[in-house]
Structures are given as structure tokens and as C-alpha cells.
Amino acid sequence: MDALDRKIIAALRLNGRATYAELGRTVGLSASSVHERVGKLEAAGVITGYHATVNPSTVGLGVTALVGIQPTDTADDNDVAKELGALPEVESCYAVAGDEAFVVKVRVPTVDELEHTLGRLRRIGGVARTRTTVVLSTRFEGRPNNTVLEDPPATGA
């Protein structure tokens, strides 16, 4: 992956709907060259997909919570993660250091539904306890972090 690939990735992270021609103008390549590079980045697993970003409350998911999952001493983390992934309310799952093995982001329509979801989480085999933080508002989320994709600063001589 070279500097042009990094520029293409940065542009796609800002606008996943950009055409190859638009990307080409941004990075200084032809549309066909960009198409070829994007195909290679997809094939290599660098670009793993494209999606629409929606406002959760407008689609009926007005309650967001971050739930820490503390496993039992005998729990298999892979089994617990698989069970967490089976719950449609669990949007993201992070393996973390500390008392909890996982932190999951849950989105549901109501606080009542959050209570039901927490009950389902606690019934997963290998879950000892949960710790929940309800999100009051989201200041930002999912913003692209292109710092590693930018050209490195020039060193002075």
C-alpha cells in the first residue's frame, strides 16, 4: 500500500459514495486507475465494505448504552463473543483490558427494551455480571481517523 492508496482510502472514508472519477480528481489519477486500486484494496481486505450512516433515533433506536461484560472464571471469551454477536441489539463489541472482557454498544427503541436486552445479556453462558452506562447524547461517532493515512511530515535537514 503506497501513498496514493492511502489518499484513496482517506477520501473514501470521508465519502464512501464518491465515484472513481471524483476520487481520481482528488488523488491525481484516472478513474480506471482508481478503480483498479480500489479493487486491489478490497481484494486484500483493506476495504471491507460500504454502508449508509443513519441517525439511530430516526429509525426507532433512541436509546444507546455501553455495557461492560464481566465473564465468569471459566468462560471462553470466543463463545461469549459469539453469543453477543447473535443479539441484534448489540451493534459493536470490543475486547478490552480490565475487569470486563468486553464492552458492547447496544441500541434499542426504549429503556424498557434496554432492560429486556440486559436480561438477555446476563443469561449468556459465561457472563458473570454487566455494568451499563446509558448514553445521554452523542457528540460524535464513527468519524474517520485518517491520521495514519496522511503523508508523513517532512523532516527538516
Image: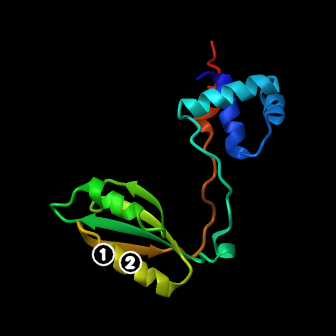
Q: Is residue 154 left or right of residue 85?
A: right
Locate residue 8, reporting x and y percent.
70, 32
Question: Residue 53: x, y in percent?
Answer: 67, 58
Q: Is residue 156 above or below residue 119?
A: above
Which residue is at the front of the view, 80 or 86? 86
Q: Residue at 67% of width from left, 37% of height from top?
A: 10
Tell me which corner region of the image, top left, top right, bottom left or bottom right, holds residue 56: bottom right
Q: Quadrant of residue 133?
A: bottom left
Q: Amino acid at mark 1?
A: Arg
Label 2: which residue? 118
Name, please, the residue furthest toward the bottom.
112
Q: Residue 75 appears in which quarter of the rendering?
A: bottom left
Q: Is residue 63 left or right of residue 125?
A: right
| Above/below status of 34 relative to 137 | above
Residue assigned mark 1: 122
Marks 2 & 1, CB-CB < 8 Å contact: yes
